[in-house]
Amino acid sequence: MNRREWIKQLTMAGTAASLAGSSDAAFGLGAQPSGSSSLTKLETEIVRLKLRHTWTTVMSSSEYRDVLYVRYTRDGVTGHGEGAPIVRYKEDAKSAQAAVQSAVELISRGDPWQFEKLMAEVFERIEGQYAAKAAVDIALMDWVGQKLGVPLYRYFGLDPADAPVTTFSIGIDTPAITRQKVREAAPYPVLKIKVGLDTDEATIAAVRSVTEKPLRVDANEGWRDKEEAVRKINWLATQGVEFVEQPMPASMLEETRWVHERVHLPLIADEACEHASDIPRLVGAYDGVNIKLDKCGGIMQAYRMIQIARSLGLKTMLGCMISSSVSVTAAAHLSPLVDYADLDGNLLIANDPFSGVKVEGGKLTLPDRPGLGLKPASASG
Ligand code: MG
């Protein structure tokens, strides 16, 4: 190490030490494996995303969502990651942040070039908390892509021209507000309509009073009676609907198989498909799976799930939670691999700190900058 590098490292160590003592959960660890001249810093931050509209599904109604940001800095490059904790799995932003903090030393001392091994150790260390794991995985993959100087889609050998159209989601609301939301969604050629309450027919009628666009419907486990599910799905088939996502509770697999034999629309598993190991048993009950980084724990896990689902003859879909452009762009880099995309979480919020993937003519347009290819939201271009 020459004198200049030595001074630089001392300066960085001082910065890390001051951050480590602050309350914003920043961490610096100077000791690296021999031969490394770097210093790794891992920071976590809870970010409150404000929704453009109150967001209602079968599960909840809210004005904002708190997500976890992870920043992984090493060798002068910062990788950004994000996880949107999922209430259904008993996660929240604080528990996600605590989970990442519990693994700070492990992550900081690990070799990011061996991200497969490093993430396996993170999965072993942290129980549950898949959104937290996703935030770490995304930050590492963003860092790796930036260091290699390639966009992540190129790292995975994908053609960005194959990126699909994304749906734009319409949450459950009154017919008047539903009509207004559908009008605001004019730029998006396919809509995803949330249903699963007593108001399903009125919701679809409100949408159809405004648009002829193809629709995809998500019941979020809302129908608990198999005859009712068959009746609703066969009615939806007459309404220009392409498929139905998670019609019945995830636990009702046999009932869903019964429904599957009696309907003509494809059924897509969302809540029934969290991890790779869930996929084989879904064959015969569902036609496809909705894979989300926050459910499965990141980009590498999602990639694995896409390959497994395809090998079993299932359709593949990439979805997201309400998230900023960090997480949505991460998923979008894998989107050339899938049949359907529902990557609109960043479009539903009013204070996105970043810009990354864009939607042009409904189609996902991937940034061609290295890693995730994020820019601060204020930057143009
Ligand atoms: Mg869903």
Image: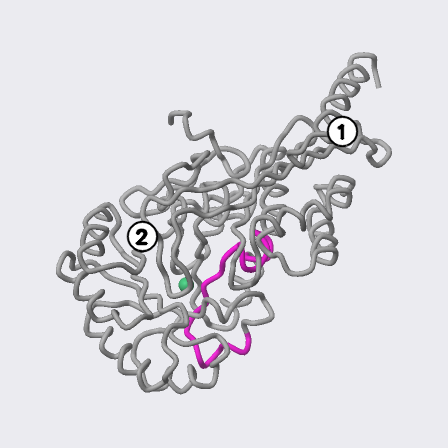
Q: Which mark is residue 168?
A: 2
Q: Nearer the viewer, residue 134 or 33?
A: 134
Three-letter code for the amino acid on which mark 1 is drawn? Ser
Image coordinates of residue 123 in percent, x first then y, are: 69, 57
Q: Are marks 1 and 2 in contact (CB under 8 Å)?
A: no
Decide whether residue 281 is among the magenta residues: yes
Which segment did they paint magenta? 280-302
Q: Is residue 58 left or right of residue 282?
A: left
Q: Quadrant of residue 281?
A: bottom right
Q: Residue at x 62, y 52 (%)?
A: 95
**Gap in Å between the C-alphas at discs 1 and 2?**
42 Å
User: For the N terminus, which image quadrant?
Assistant: top right
Secondary structure of the residue carrying tag 1 is loop
Q: Which mark is residue 38?
A: 1
Secondary structure of the residue carrying tag 2 is strand
Q: Is residue 14 above or below residue 348?
A: above
